């Protein structure tokens, strides 16, 4: 019987400089798509996949994240008094069972691999998930749940994967594919931010991982990779060299890169259009605006 994946690491220590000045005082993960912070989308996806323990790797200035997952007794009392049961219900998804959430500080920004390594003692010797909240994935069946189901068949390490335009591949971790079985590919290598022209494929790693504890041991070596950072991709690739399987999983769904302004705006529009109460007004506005700008050209 394969061990169940019940723990997830959320690396949220980044400075979010691409969104300055907003991120001067608001953690990037608290920025909202419609009315829910980015991190809420990741938490909901993790819950749907059966995750029970949520480990945040944070840094200075991220206390708003801790408050977000805490009860707010004054607000709740006020809503109860006013009979706003629907809003009370909405708040429920932000609360965590006591002991289900942990915060670990990454004291120095040494890279994604290092951030994940900071959580090693809370993971112990079992498979775990890593979720990058910047990658928001709209899907009928949440992406991590799809991966957990595939992982139950394959075991090993598994990364979410997506074809990207070849000229964009150098911005990602990229898979070197040994065998393509459709939804699942078997990787013979992985490269973080390959030099343009040297990409082994255009199958990019997206921010969802199911990993074996051996990856944490690989990270103990603190090897510097692309950009002088300790890269998660390198630690996973090391498992391939040690003869352990690494699979890419082509998920069904639409991924938004909410680490970029353009991706964030696209996600805002997509999630708003998915909401019954917003769709009519917004699509009317978008159609009119597009027509007006076309007419002006
Ligand atoms: C990180 C990973 C990279 C992955 C990407 C997905 O890079 O290091 O392998 O392809 O997330 O979003 P970052 O976007 O933090 O540079």
Image (tube, rainbow, N blue to C red):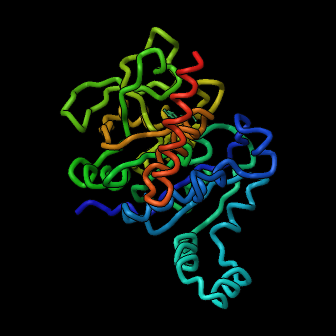
Residue 157 in view here: yes
The residue depicted at 61 percent of the width and 42 percent of the height is 114
Is 59 left or right of 99, judged from the image as shown? right
The residue nearer to you, when weighing 265 against 82, is: 82
The residue nearer to you, when weighing 187 against 120, is: 187
Is 243 left or right of 89, judged from the image as shown? left
Q: Where is residue 187 in the image (x, y as percent from the top left)?
A: 31, 30
Is 174 left or right of 288, judged from the image as shown? left
Q: Where is residue 69 in the image (x, y as percent from the top left)?
A: 63, 69
Q: In which quarter of the image is the N terminus?
A: bottom left
The residue nearer to you, when weighing 34 against 39, is: 34
70 is higher (above) or lower (below) than 106: below
223 is higher (above) or lower (below) than 201: below
Q: Position of residue 118 (x, y in %)?
A: 62, 51
Write down the quadrant of residue 237 in the picture: top left
276 is higher (above) or lower (below) than 285: below
Residue 232 in view here: no
The residue depicted at 58 percent of the width and 32 percent of the height is 262
The residue nearer to you, when weighing 59 against 94, is: 94
Q: Position of residue 277 (x, y in %)?
A: 48, 60
């Amino acid at each position: 019987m394969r061990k169940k994946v019940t723990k997830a690491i959320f690396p949220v220590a980044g400075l979010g400089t691409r969104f300055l000045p907003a991120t001067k005082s608001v953690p990037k993960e608290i920025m909202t798509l419609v009315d829910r912070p980015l991190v809420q989308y990741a938490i909901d996806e993790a819950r749907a996949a059966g995750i029970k323990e949520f480990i945040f790797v944070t840094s200075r200035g991220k206390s708003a994240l801790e408050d977000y997952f805490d009860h707010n007794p004054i607000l709740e009392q006020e809503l109860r008094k006013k009979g706003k049961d629907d809003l009370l219900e909405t708040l429920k998804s932000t609360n965590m069972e006591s002991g289900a959430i942990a915060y670990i500080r990454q004291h120095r920004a040494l890279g994604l691999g290092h951030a994940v390594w900071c959580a090693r003692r809370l993971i112990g010797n079992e498979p775990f998930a890593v979720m990058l909240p910047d990658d928001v994935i709209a899907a009928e069946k949440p992406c991590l749940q799809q991966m957990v189901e595939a992982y139950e068949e394959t075991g090993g390490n598994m990364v979410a994967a997506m074809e990207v335009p070849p000229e964009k591949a150098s911005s990602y971790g990229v898979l070197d594919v040994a065998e393509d079985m459709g939804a699942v590919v078997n990787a013979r290598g992985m490269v973080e931010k390959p030099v343009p022209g040297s990409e082994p494929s255009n199958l990019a790693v997206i921010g969802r991982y199911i990993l074996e504890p051996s990856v944490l041991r690989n990270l103990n070596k603190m090897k510097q990779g692309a950009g002088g950072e300790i890269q998660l991709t390198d630690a996973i690739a090391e498992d391939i060299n040690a003869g352990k399987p690494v699979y890419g999983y082509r998920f069904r769904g639409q991924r938004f890169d909410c680490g970029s302004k353009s991706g964030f705006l696209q996600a805002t529009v997509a999630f708003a259009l998915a909401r019954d109460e917003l769709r009519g007004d917004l699509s009317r506005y978008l159609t009119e605006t597009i027509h007006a700008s076309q007419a002006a050209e």
